[in-house]
Image (spheres, grey):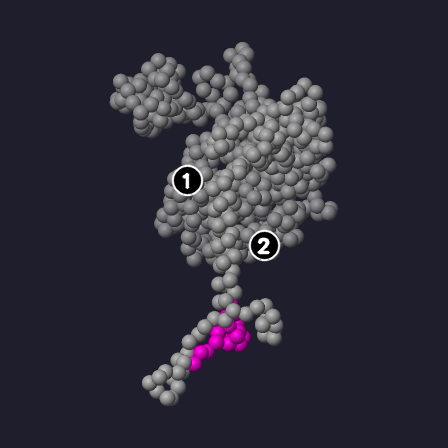
Amino acid sequence: MYCSRLFIMPHLVPSSSYTFTIMKHGINLLHIESRLSRQNKTDHEFYVECDNSMGSLPDAIKQLREESKYIHILSRAHKTLDESVPWFPRKMRDLDQFANRVLSYGSELDADHPGFRDVLYRKRRKEFADIAHQYRHNQPIPHVTYTEQEILTWATVFRELTQLYPAHACKEFNNVFPLLIDNCGYNETNIPQLEDVSQFLQDCSGFRLRPVAGLLSSRDFLAGLAFRVFHSTQYIRHHSVPMYTPEPDVCHELLGHVPLFADPDFAEFSQEIGMASLGAPDEYITRLATLYWFTVEFGLCMESDERKAYGAGLLSSFGELQYCVSDKPSIMPFDPFRASIQPYPITSYQPTYFLAESFKDAKEKLREIFFIGWCPPEDDLTSTMPVQETLNFTIFIKNFIEFPEFGVKHKNMVDNLQQCTFDPKNDTDCPIFTIDYIMKEAEKNITELNLMLRYGGVVRIKLDWDCNLDRNIKRCKPEYSFARLDVPFHEKPFSRGFNFRHASYWKRNKKHFRTLTKAFGLRFIITISGKAGKFDFITLTLNIGSLVGLFGLGTIVCDILLLHLSKRARIYRNHVFEIVHLRTRASSTPRVPRISVQQHFDKHSLSHLNI
């Protein structure tokens, strides 16, 4: 059994040598590392990977529990000592724990791989593997500069496949593919970047991409789908055989998978397969992986009486895309029970395909196996609208405000609350509201309102205070307004409304059980804003002075416009200024200095100036 464990040792035992003593129970240690504990800087955390195929893991765990403050076990056999439910990620960040545990390929290639003897290609594969190994949740996917040879390989695959899509791909695929060309740089001369494609998917369906070095185990890969995370490679197939690859590459991911992951229905279809895998026994994981193979990878559906492909393995293979719609393979009606146990080859064309009546038919039949099987999926269609029964409930909003500058405190209470219910005409001061009134004020569209009562929603209740403190403080009342904060259902096709999940755990007959509940409801967010004012003589004086100054400034501005900026400035200037001639005694010849004197004239003297 391969497993990992994290445990915290007290500060009295900082040395890893003591840890090795604990682990000496015939267990093969594969990796061990230590660091200061995040919980207590005086303690140390140890991360250990081991192989227990020959040793006594229970004895080692027992000793660790006695000596350590905390221990957490991640078992690759997926059964811990105390739990009968296999470990699975609880949140998206947990995917970091297994994303680098590839089973095959990555930077290591099999002897029959087309690039096995190409030293440069193997070196390039290692570069891509290093990017995936260093990636962590919520980081932007690093940009990759592809070589000219890699782009030529992509161009060959892109050119050949895009000629077949209009005739052989399902309509959901063909609807999205032009959007990828417009928004993500899909063309012959460019290999799209995973980060750009991931952002596009998040906007369309909530799916996102995560770089991976090679093939993951079925359990780990399906667990990512449960969080709408698709582990995608970045390397490309060997250039010597552009139309063949023994393992998924960037052509397979971007051309085969991405277009349909952008479709909300297909995204939900894929997520449900992933959710069914969380905590499932190994035998169910095998069946789920086989179902994934015959649907998401090699699925067929009928469309206008024609056979169309929706599986990524078909849509990324030039030869098999034509082969699957021919008369050569065996075609069987889609039956999830039968498909889950159907043998299949990996390196050759499929001898058998499962044909669904439609894509919706495949989705509904797949849900049947979950309802009858080990993990029923969520069924939003059967919601009983429980919020409808609470519309006559009331909400009491009690609010206190303070204006520190004026030393005033106030509240939105009324003298008698017993007979009080808010009414926009008769009782606007009452702080008690019915949910029915709030919902109708927040959402006027009846269709959207009914959907909110079924799937939940988020409503903002705003209290706006505007107080004149020169009047009686009791006359200061808030104004209430209501608005919807969540996105309307017709604009958001996935993750609609407001809901949250909570789990209850119990143990019976030494087995652990869990009930996961998805609760729908209304969330009210209350925001408060306010302003207040009071008469102040000094402020009034300053305002009057400013106003008088503005009037004086107006005269100056008018003079500048008329005497300097106007086209008729010379005419205006001649009427405003007068030239006075002065004669001196020393000379008989008059000496005429130019002295400008501003005249004062009434409003009638400018009537002929055509102002």
Work out which quarter of the rendered image holds the N terminus and state it: top left
Which residue is label 1 attached to? 135
* Residue at figure coordinates x 61%, y 24% from the top left: 413
Q: How many numbered circles does the render carry?
A: 2
Name the residue located 48 percent from the left edge and 24 percent from the top edge: 87
Taking the view exactly as shown, the residue that stands out farthest to the top is 509
Viewer-side residue, 149 vs 450: 450
Residue at the bottom extreme of this rendering: 588
Give whichever of 274, 441 is nearer the camera: 441
**How far from the left and from the top, in percent, is residue 257?**
56, 44
Q: In 3D space, how far apart are the residues under numbered discs 2 and 1 (Cα atoms)?
A: 31 Å
Place residue 362 in its image quadrant.
top right
Q: Residue furthest front?
A: 585
Kind of residue indicated by mark 2: Thr
Q: Position of residue 503 (x, y in %)?
A: 55, 21
Magenta-highlighted residues: 561-581
Callout 1 crowding tier (Cα within 10 Å): few <14, some 14–19, many ≥20 = some
Is 320 in front, or is 548?
548
Q: Is residue 464 above or below residue 512?
A: below
Asked if the residue at tag 1 contacts the one at tag 2, i.e. Cβ–Cβ closer than 8 Å, the answer is no
What amino acid does circle 1 point to? Answer: Tyr
Residue 4 at least partly seen? yes
Look at the image and say whether residue 566 sits in the magenta stretch. Answer: yes
Q: What numbered label is drawn on residue 162?
A: 2
